Image: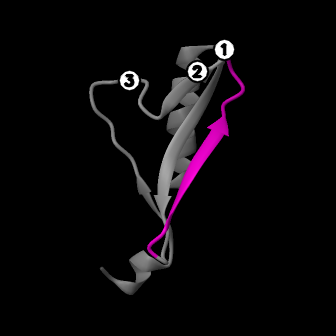
Amino acid sequence: MSTTTLLHPILALRFGENPDHHLWNNNGTWWCHYTEHLPDYTKRRVRLSLHTHDRSVARILRDALLQEAA
């Protein structure tokens, strides 16, 4: 692994056949969750509210959030 790779967190993202992967509904509000692997070889679990009750909006917000985080 190069030094430049170790300077920034690496996201652990998995996409498969489930279009709602990285999403969960908590009492009607959609949340996004993913894991960052940090330069010191630890990991951080990130959980963020998407502030929406609409699944299709949550998917769009999740995609934008993960794109920004990457």
Q: Could you tell me which residue is drawn at 33 percent across and 83 percent down?
A: 2
Amino acid tagged 1: Gly
Q: Residues within 10 Å of mark 1 (few under 14, many from 20)?
A: few
Q: Which residue is mark 2?
A: 25
**Tag 3 and tag 2, C-beta contact below 8 Å:** no
Indicate the secondary structure of the residue bearing disc 2. strand
Instruction: For the N terminus, give its image quadrant.
Output: bottom left
The image shows residue 33 at horizontal and vertical percentages of 54, 40
Q: Is residue 61 above or below residue 70?
A: above
Q: Which residue is mark 1?
A: 28
Amino acid tagged 3: Pro
* Apparent side of residue 45 relative to residue 16 in the rendered image (left or right): right
Q: Which region of the structure is painted magenta?
A: 41-53
The image shows residue 10 at horizontal and vertical percentages of 44, 63
Amino acid tagged 2: Asn
Which is nearer the N-term, disc 1 or disc 3?
Answer: 3
Which disc number belongs to residue 58? none
